[in-house]
Image (cartoon, grey):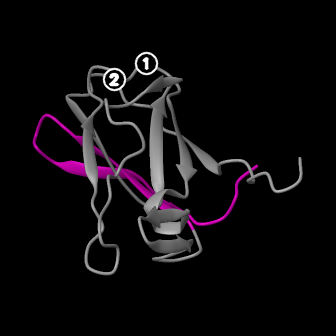
Amino acid sequence: MPGAAPPAPGSRLRAPPPPGLPAALVSASALGVYELRLNGTRVGDQILAPEWTNYHKRIQYQTYDLTDKLVQGQNVIGSWLGNGYYKGRVNWPGIPERRCIYGDKLGLILELDIEWSGKERQRLVERWVNEIVR
């Protein structure tokens, strides 16, 4: 279709939890908007996080508790990225349409932290995605 937007980029990260996992948190932030899924189920109740922010001054992040959602064996954290206010089309009354107000490359960071029973923390996953993953 002429003029159609390209598909939303995404990524998939696999993280097998060890037995007896006491706590697991994932923190995420994006240049654009994102949606996370764990084993196919949406993480959190936000739609297209983070909300609007002035990306020149701050970038919001969200942290989600995955402790009760992980399963034994392989777990997959999936993400979708969209343009949002960062790269997308933004219109205000009386101002011509603008795109890429804050930047023109999408990005996402995920950090999966495990807290062991001895309160020792281990970061299992850290990844930036700033190009389309197919």
Q: Residue at image x 37%, y 23%?
A: 70
Query: Which residues are the magenta region?
Result: 106-134
- Of the two numbered discs 1 and 2 on the same chain, state the one appearing first in sequence: 2
Q: Observer-nearest residue: 94 or 108?
A: 94
Say what secondary structure mark 2 lies in.
loop
- Amino acid type at mark 1: Gln
Q: Position of residue 31 (x, y in %)?
A: 45, 65
Q: Which residue is mark 1?
A: 72
Q: Are marks 1 and 2 in contact (CB under 8 Å)?
A: yes
Q: Residue at image x 53%, y 23%?
A: 40
Between disc 1 and disc 2, the foreground one is: 1
Reading the image, the residue beneath label 2 is: 19
Residue at the bottom extreme of this rendering: 56
In the figure, residue 119 lies in which quadrant? top left
Find residue 20 and report its horizontal and vertical position in percent.
Answer: 26, 22
- Left-right relation of 9 to 27: right
Left or right, residue 56 beside residue 132: left
Q: Main secondary structure of the magenta part?
A: strand
Q: Secondary structure at mark 1?
A: loop
